[in-house]
Amino acid sequence: MKLHSPLCDLFGIEYPIVLAGMGGASTPELAAAVSNAGGLGVLGAAACQPEELREWIRRTRALTDKPFGVDTLLPASVRRTAQTQDDGAEDPADQLAEHLRFAREFMDREQLQAPAPRGDRQNASGSNLQVFSKAFFDAQMQVVIEERVPVYAAGLGNPGPWMAEMQYNGTRVMAVVGAVRHAIQVATIGLDAIVAQGHDAGGHNSPVGAMALIPQVVDAVGKIPVLGAGGIGDGRGVAAAMMLGAAGGWIGTAFLAAEESGIAQHQKQALVEGTEEGTVISRSVTGKPARIIRSKWTDAWERAEIQPLPMPYQGIVSGPVMAAASASGRADVNPGFAGQGMGLIKAIRPAADILREIVDTAEASLSRATYFI
């Protein structure tokens, strides 16, 4: 049974396997490798400054003549914070000094050196754009529109304000959701596909498990193709998602340990050595609940008397710590994000080999299912 669905015709790809847009991991090299192997590679561009994003898009085009996508974040909570602070809650900016002190004390205990400031956090005009601010998101989306990318994915939030321009350019648009009500909301803006991402997924995810979420989103959005996500680490997971009504799989963790992945070698090794029990839901890195490999940093926040700040402020707190840990090869402090399918990763391999194995096992699993029916 050949692995094929309407998603393949929609995106112009051979197999209904889409690389999740993982920040730091889904680089042009990984996205191009997945696209060249027959899936849809997606750039994890959440933290890319606008000109860096433009360079990534053009580099991907130089590496593949196949369709590819760009994933950024459009979290509504950031837009609300930018618009108003009238709910009586303490302004996160006023708490920042205390949280930065917590981070410095952590770095001192762990003997981590603060990294030098990065010049590439400035855009071409030389002005600083705070990562994960409204201005930052708007500038990223302008690049997506100007570069006429084949596919755009909103990893968080609603891309509605930009739909008309992207559709005019011929860009296919999808959004990642973690609840049926979110799927219904974004379905009204004319999306081409929806990703139903369950609680088992790495990074920002849902409080609902993938097995429960996928069929309910499928039922709720009618004819819009749904990609299943969350804990899908091999072809058996893809087959299961398709049996639940999905048109394909949105896969992240399985590709984290690819040779082309942009994460550090010590983080890839942590994935190989990890198990399904090795992750935790924590707000300690981004400010939003995210599934992360358990570390000294996540443990420190579990014990702390203060709570992580909301996005984007927690990123200001965690960023120097994560950068220092990565520079020192400290997997015990920054092992990275991963889903509960991490235990299926046994080796660091080329992305094409990973995709080929996913396709083969999905086809075999679907054939067995058809036999028993």
Image: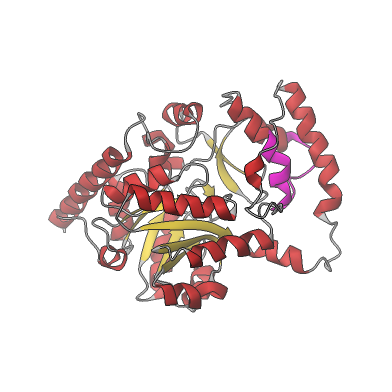
Vertically, is 363 above or below 301? Answer: below
Residue 350: image quadrant is top left
Total numbered badges shown on the rendered structure: 0
Residue 366 colored in magenta in the image? no
Residue most extreme to the front: 125
> Image quadrant of residue 223?
bottom left
Q: Locate the N terminus by quadrant.
A: bottom left
In the image, taking residue 304 as reference, residue 366 lies left or right, namely left
Front-most of residues 25 and 196: 25
Point 67% across, 40% down: residue: 319
Q: Position of residue 373 (x, y in %)?
A: 16, 59
Provide residue 297's location: percent of width, then percent of height.
Answer: 66, 33
Identify which residue, 247 or 41, lies in the foreground: 41
What segment carries the magenta color? 303-320
Residue ID at (52%, 42%): 24
Tell me if residue 75 comes above or below residue 93 in the rendering. Answer: below
When the figure is inspected, residue 73 is found, relative to residue 339, above or below; the finding is: below
Whether residue 305 is visible, yes or no, is no
Figure check: 82 above or below 296: below
Position of 246 with respect to 165 (left or right) is: left
Residue 175 coordinates in the image, percent (x, y): 48, 64
Residue at left offset 41%, top offset 69%: 171
Residue 306 belongs to magenta span: yes
Q: How is the image coloured?
A: secondary structure
Residue 61 percent coordinates (x, y): 37, 53
Describe residue 316's horizontal placement relative to residue 167 as left or right. Answer: right
Residue 71 visible to the viewer? yes
